[in-house]
Image (cartoon, rainbow, N blue to C red):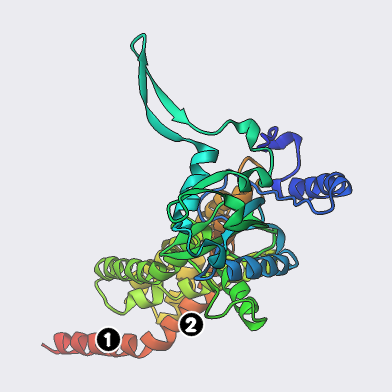
Amino acid sequence: MVVQLVPLAHRAGVYDLMDKYRKGMGGILFTDDPSATLSLSAGGGPPGSNSTVTLSLVSPDQDLLQARSEKILEFVKNHAYVTSATSSTSDVTIERDFTPSESKMEGTGISPGEVASLLQTYASGTHSGDVQIGGQSYPIMVQIDPTYLSDGQSLLNLPIYSPTERGRLQVGQLGGLVVRQSPISVLRYNRLYTATLSINLAKKAPSALTFQNTLTDEMTSKGLLDSTVTVGSGGAFSSATLAREVQTSGITAFLLALGLAYLVMAAQFNSWRYPVYLFLPVPLAIVGALLFIVILGGGLDTFGLLGVLLLIGLSAKNAILYLDFVVERVGKMPLKEALTDSARLRFRPIIMTTLTVLVIAGPLVFGHGEGSEFGQRLGIVMFGGILTSAVLTFFIVPAAFYLFERKRVEKRAESEAGDGLRSAEV
């Protein structure tokens, strides 16, 4: 059942509503049927969001997979970060399987395949041809009258011809029916049986990939996963798969963005050393972003990792504004005075640009609009990273620049003073 919610101004958040509906609907449903299951999930989130995680279990043995998936489902439901979970093997149906007897079929000249084909023809019919009536083609199906197939015994009473005995036998003389539960659908992946777990995460749950890795380690330690039952990919577009791809390529993308930004800044300042000072706020910003995530709870999703890439430019711009003034004043006044004077003059522009970014990130963090639950990680990363880097830029960048550039500036000043004396003598 799909429910369309009213505008957020007239209701609570999605996660709060899910908890409320889960308690209310569960009380009604489980009273009438204690064996019933209830699953709620928030739709409409972007790929890689934390709402739902799809976990695939694969095994070469279907019966083993069925038994193990029931234990895994019970374990997952009791997890601290899980609100509800369902399994593709939970939906079962009652089947009557015909099991042939080798001793009874011996000497009849009838194979198990012939018995299966005959039962399928009796129950489902066979296509014998088509008839044209008024320009329309109608198929002709030949099958037994459904009124004669009232129960399982009626199937066993159906006749089958024996070429060895040159007569008719009843199907029940060759075997019997076995009633058992069977899943409604049987999934395969790379010729292995597959069971899919749909897991709805709580609001404070970590990212999909972190949760899946943690859950996999816990199930392995408890013996629920081994060489016979393993965890698959969960689909090409699942949250964990997308997060894994971002994590794999994220380091490369981060280093590439860092390298390109370094080349641009080196060309701007005509120096290979100065961009190093400009990038000092980047690790500080990342630490601040992670600290805010820990404080507010949850983990990094796909959009949170995108925010980490944005921090390269957003956190370095404060150092650019500051260091540009420092370079202009190094030859005109002592280094320490140039650092303090530049900090005083660039304090207001840096604060203004920082407040602009914080105002932009504020609605993402504290917003309550439609879909705001799925974009908070990007806002948290931007808010925490920029706030931390802006504060520490006035301490870390001047201290590092003074520590490593002081001797170079003094040598340059002495060299220029010597050149001035020689020019005066001439």
Between disc 2 and disc 1, the foreground one is: 2
Reading the image, the residue beneath label 1 is 412
User: Helix or strand or loop: what does disc 1 sit on?
Assistant: helix
Q: Nearer the viewer, residue 48 or 352?
A: 48
Rate crowding at label 2 as few (under 14), some (14 to 19) or many (20 or more) other CA atoms within 10 Å: some
Give percent across and percent down for residue 325: 39, 67
Tell me, for residue 94, which label it has, or none: none
Relative to residue 122, is residue 411 depicted above or below?
below
User: Helix or strand or loop: what does disc 2 sit on?
Assistant: helix
The residue sitting at 53% across, 69% down in the picture is: 389
Q: Nearer the viewer, residue 338 or 41?
A: 41
The residue sitting at 61% across, 53% down in the picture is: 172
Residue 395 as seen in the image, left or right of residue 419: right
| Amino acid on which the number 1 mark rests in the picture | Arg
Give percent across and percent down for residue 421: 20, 89
Tell me, for residue 399, which label it has, or none: 2
Q: Which quadrant, please, contains the C terminus?
A: bottom left
Q: Nearer the viewer, residue 331 or 168?
A: 168
The residue sitting at 40% across, 81% down in the picture is: 334
Q: Nearer the viewer, residue 37 or 17?
A: 37
| Residue 98 can be seen, yes or no | no
Residue 92 as seen in the image, left or right of residue 163: right
Give percent across and percent down for residue 1: 67, 38
Residue 94 as seen in the image, left or right of residue 139: right
Mark positioned earlier in the residue sequence (2 or 1): 2
Which residue appears farthest toward the top when viewing the image? Answer: 134
Give percent across and percent down for residue 145: 58, 30
Relative to residue 266, is residue 356 depicted above or below?
above
Relative to residue 405, is residue 340 depicted above or below?
above
| Residue 384 can be seen, yes or no | yes
Rate crowding at label 1 as few (under 14), some (14 to 19) or many (20 or more) other CA atoms within 10 Å: few
3D distance between C-alphas at marks 2 and 1: 20 Å
